[in-house]
Image (cartoon, rainbow, N blue to C red):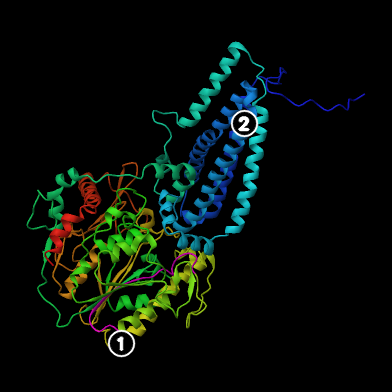
Amino acid sequence: MESTQAAAPFRPGQETKTPGRVPPLARSLAWLVLVQVLFYTALRIAFFLAFRASGGETTGADLARAFELGARFDLRLALVVSLPLVALAWIGSIRPGWNRAASLLGQVWLTAAGLLATSIFFFDFGHYAYMHRRLEATVLDELRSPRESLAMIWDTYPVLWGLAALALIGWGWLLLARSTFRVAQRPSPLRGFRRAGAAFACGALIVLGLYGNLSWYPLRWSQAFFGTNDFVSALASNPVIYFTETLLHRSRQADRASVERNYELLSDLLEVEPRDPHTLSFARRFVPERSPPFRPNLVVVHLESWAAFKTGAFGNPLPASPHFDALAKDSLLFTRFFVPTGPTARSVFSMITGIPDVPANNPDSSASRDPKSIRQPLLVTALAGYSKHYFLGGSANWANIRALLGGNIVDLSIHEEGSYPDKERVDGWGISDLDLFESAVETFDASPGPFFAFIQTSGNHRPYTIPAHSPGFERAEADEETLRKAGFDSLEAYNGFRLLDYSVGRFFALAAERPWYRDTIFVLYGDHGVPAVNDIPFERMGISKHHVPLVIHAPRLVEAGRRIDYPGSSVDILPTCLSLMGVPYVNSALGRDLLADRPEDRRFAFLSNGLVMGDWFLRLEDAGDARLYRCDAEKAPEDLAAREPALVERMTTIHRAIQDWALWTQHDFARRLSIQGGSL
């Protein structure tokens, strides 16, 4: 006859035997770690399925290695999360009076840690969809502009569904913590040497799991970057570990000693005369030989995410940029033009200051957010007697741009949200680019004298909003295969690109009707490129995110239809324009006049991941390795580093010298201001 008496509840310290020979504490740890690794693996598989189309050509061996490395990162994270809870369970089992508090703390720990890890995974998914790279500590800087950041997140992502999923997963973490505690506190069936041996074996396995490698060095995040395919590297990474590493390595110090060592090298490269190695001055005074018979206006148009490979001017098969392409044919087009780095804030800083953005306090942030980097001697200040304007659809508080521009340019008129009372805000980025250009034209019409303007577009950006009021613009339709062959990862991205092109066409149609049009120099450049989903040669080299067009359109000053194929960078824009305008200036930054005669070995573009010089591109890997490519490769690029060791060494030295100089000089503004400001 079966007994109906309920089983007595288990009490810590109760002397009952547990089936099996594995201690309950070890079994609970193994179970807790296994569940987490399976959970993280499921998220990795979801990541692979969601973004595999952006990975270009991948081999089965690379994918297998990525998943294997990812599992080791996941194991490390699972152990880090699990060990505090198991330690609390062990303390509670040997001190029954403390068991209730230990149980509560353990549940709080695992639920909080699990939710934090899951949240980072969720944000990582959105960040990769947005930026095509893993979540980095730089996103914390966006908290300084919470309204814009939250508006963009709300407009772009399914926030409510995400919160509901997090709540459900948090409940699962809580249940997992409770079940782990119940098992972990049962007494061990082992005694004496067997118990000590089991504890030693368990400890050894934990150490091995945390170490992560069967080699001299432990598992490091850089191991995920075992090839040149950024998607495979992202797949191999654990977003929580990667984010933590970027958070812990946010500080770099300017190295004056390096600048001193490389002063002659950089002076030769930048054609500095006279030289002063004691003050480390790089100031160069320029007085143009010729000046136009009028005072040209200067309008710089910053094109959001305007990658070169997406335009018809660079061979794209889709009609994504007909207005820009027509303008390029009627202008001066630089085909081998690059930005030192992205994202947008760093691109703006580099262009406006002439210093590649290498922030000292946070390599993943932007110098515009560093108070020590805000004060800079900008070349725009050489435009004496000009009215000066900055146009942005949203708020100039974004990335502290207000301080960078308004804090250095006297009498700058900042046109931002609130400045366009008759324009409708379309999303988190403010008014549409169509309305932004229209407002700029109205401002130029009212300008009594020569003017300078910096127009920062933002529409070609997630969530790719098409304003309800877009007269004359029609959405295009294209199938997924056609889009990907042309380098677009979605129909929304294609139409967002088309709308920015249409806005540019509308702007020039309006400008051509104005009397100030012929007296104006128009400069259009991409603020940064984007990863190419169609696996073009520049993407394989790792350079497509830097490669952008530069167009200079000046009806009375620039020969139409001319293409320039030697390298240049966004730091060169303002020196080139001032020379065209016949304005004398002193330059102590990196930029130079792109139209001046100079030897080919002094034509270069500094990039965050390498250096373009002549026909060569040197790519520097995080692990310290170097790859050398020909920029004119039309098929699969070949790494020629082993054949050209002297060239690799020279270009590597130049890159490191410029990088150290940029880090040092952006904080050396007082001396630079005294040299530059007194000479203009």
Magenta region, residue range? 446-464
**Residue placed under numbered mark 2 in the picture:** 101
Horizontal side of residue 120 vs 550, given as left or right: right
Badge 1 or badge 2: first in the primary sequence: 2
Residue 546 is at least partly visible in this image: no
Quadrant holding the C terminus: bottom left
Q: Where residue 242 appears, x then y in whole percent?
A: 44, 44
Instruction: Kindly give the residue lying farthest to the right in the view shown.
Output: 1
Residue at image location 18% in from the left, 74% down from the top: 384
Residue 249 position (above or below residue 577): above
Q: Position of residue 641 (x, y in %)?
A: 27, 46
Q: Which amino acid does label 1 sit on?
A: Arg
Task: Classify 10 Å Cα crowding around label 1: few (below 14), some (14-19), many (20 and above).
Answer: few
The residue at the point 63 percent across, 49 percent down is 167
- Residue 197 shown in magenta: no
Disc 2 residue type? Ala
User: In the rendered view, does 509 fall on the left or right side of 280?
Assistant: right
SS at badge 2 = helix
Which circle marks residue 514 in the picture? Answer: 1
Say which element carries label 1: loop
Residue 409: x, y in percent? Answer: 25, 67
**Residue nearest the observer in this picture, 317 or 567:** 567
1 vs 2, front mark:
2
* Picture quadrant where residue 7 is located: top right
Spot the residue most to the front.
Answer: 97
Q: Is residue 509 visible?
A: yes
